[in-house]
Amino acid sequence: MHILIFEPHRGCKKVLLKKETPKINLGKTVRDGYEHIQLNSDFLPDYVGIIIYHEGKFYFRNYGKINIFVDNKRLEDSSIAIRLVHGSMIKIQYSENKNIYIGCIEGELDNKWKVFKPETNEVLDIQKDKKGYVIRNANDIIFHGKKINAKYFLPKDGDIFMHDNRIFYSMKNNLFFDVLKNTNLQQKQIVINKQKQYQPQHPQPINKRRPAISMEHVTRYDKKKKWYRLKDVNLTINSGRLVAIMGVSGAGKSTLFDAILKRLKLDEGTIKIDGDELGHVPQFSVLRKGNTVQETMEFYASKKLKKYNKEERMQKIDDLLDKLNLSLFKQSLVGRLSGGQSRRLDIAVQLLNEPRVILMDEPDSGLDIKSCRELYEILARLVADKNSTILVITHNTHMACKYPYIDDLLFMASQGRICFYGQKEDALNYFNINDLDDIYNAVENNQDYFVEKYNNLVNRRV
Ligand SMILES: Nc1ncnc2c1ncn2[C@@H]1O[C@H](COP(=O)(O)OP(=O)(O)OP(=O)(O)O)[C@@H](O)[C@H]1O
Ligand SMILES: [Mg+2]
């Protein structure tokens, strides 16, 4: 899919969206290491929103700092992602004259925008009057991702619509048009619309806001060491988030997992989890090295999938190995797998019973940058697919902060305290830094300050 970006005084910029790039940031500032589409208007915030590719479909999610509409539906909440289809229009509304319009099209464009002249038109009945253009008997026009048939269609400033193999853009009393070269794609999309697979009135939330984990006043004091292992932890993590947990060694990250897994006796506090099953990928693999990948999966399937018959279990195993790029290694011995493959097998085992919440303790340790990216891509996809919640303890600041996979950051200070939990994009402001790589520096001598700041924020929310 292409998007056409119309910024005031800056003409049209065309960008191809590729499925190889599951997340693309959109905004004024380009951050190193992120896939990014740069918008040039000064009035915009640094980060406006994100385009997500998921299972053959594109979605748009905003960052909640500016009014954004997709196909006339306002994105109230950064947890909602709206699907983009052929003809969809994203409107970034800053003020009356400062709007950015982004049209979505399937197919190639001629790239020769021309001013439309009514007298040259044979197909549509388009006339110009004092107030602008009027289209009569507007049949088969694609507008806001839907096909419309209407007696009159009056395009407003910024409207983008399509008819046949033409794309129109209306601005300042002019109508510009360009020609779509690949009309097959366009027709295919129309068929899809007819089957009502896409209904813009009902945006598809891929991240439903529901607490997956909530912790209140969780405390454990080690009397011998005179040391808190967790200190008054208050935390709510919603479903559908991929969360990176960071913090210096010994802060209490693994202890936090122990608490969630109910392996840590608490002095005080409560922990609620969505669903009964919790997945846990421990820091060190516990899988037997002498078994093959297939045997390992079958062993855990027999324990975790008691209600399923053999055929169903095998199907599930096949699906998971496929999803985690392990199909080629079914007959390999676990002890012979590479670091990345064996981490993926640890994860596959945990996914058998589809837990809603999965905890992973340093699943990326020892992985090279490529395997690491592959791993995070798989995790991001799992979250998007199943609306599950994945918490990943990591020391890989670069991967957590610079690549677009992680949604939220949880930063821990010594003695099991929280410095920050929130969307990754908000961490810059919170820590007053320009680069997320600087988080550790920012926290180093100011742990108490940030712990207090976090606690104040949480208390205000309650
Ligand atoms: N079983 C235990 N009994 C008492 N104290 C412990 C126990 N396990 C860990 N600790 C202490 O609790 C603190 C937090 O440990 P934890 O393993 O949670 O750290 P972490 O943040 O996961 O560190 P790392 O990044 O090194 O894995 C440390 O000071 C550690 O020494
Ligand atoms: Mg640890």
Image: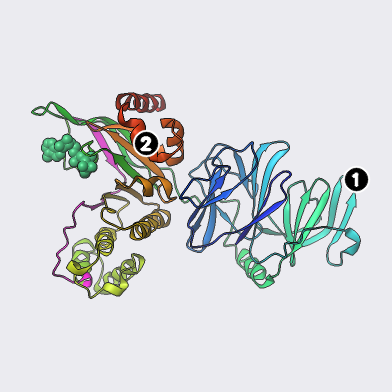
In the image, residue 218 sits, relative to residue 88, either above or below, namely above
Q: Quadrant of the N terminus?
A: bottom right
Task: Say which quarter of the image contains residue 47.
Answer: top right
Q: Secondary structure at mark 2?
A: helix
Residue 74 is at least partly visible in this image: yes
Depth check: give the residue in front, 296 or 174: 174
Does the magenta portion include 379?
no
**Disc 1 residue type?**
Lys
On whether residue 287 falls in the magenta region, the answer is: yes
Identify the residue at horizontal 42%, vertical 47% (top origin): 402
Q: Is residue 218 left or right of residue 99?
A: left
Q: Residue at x 29, y 59 (%)?
A: 351
Please identify, in this view, whether the residue under mark 2 or under mark 1 is nearer the observer. Answer: 2
Query: Image quadrant for the C terminus?
Result: top left
Secondary structure at numbered mark 1: loop
Q: Position of residue 75 (x, y in %)?
A: 57, 43
Along the viewing direction, whichever of 134 and 12 lies nearer the viewer: 12
Which numbered dot is residue 352? Answer: none
Mark 2 to mark 1 CA distance (whole Å):
57 Å
Q: Quadrant of ligand 2?
A: top left
Looking at marks 2 and 1 on the same chain, the residue that comes earlier in the sequence is marked by 1
Question: Which residue is more in the foreground, 319 or 19?
Answer: 19
User: Range of the magenta residues?
Assistant: 268-294
Q: Is residue 297 above or below residue 208?
A: below
Q: Name the spot of residue 319 as percent of width and height, x first.
A: 34, 69
Q: Is residue 396 left or right of residue 300?
A: right
Q: Which residue is mark 1?
A: 130
- Which residue carries the number 2 mark? 439
Judged left or right of residue 128, residue 400 is: left
Q: How is the image coloured?
A: rainbow
Picture coordinates of residue 267, whole percent (x, y): 16, 30
Where does the image place residue 107, in percent across and percent down from the top left?
A: 65, 66
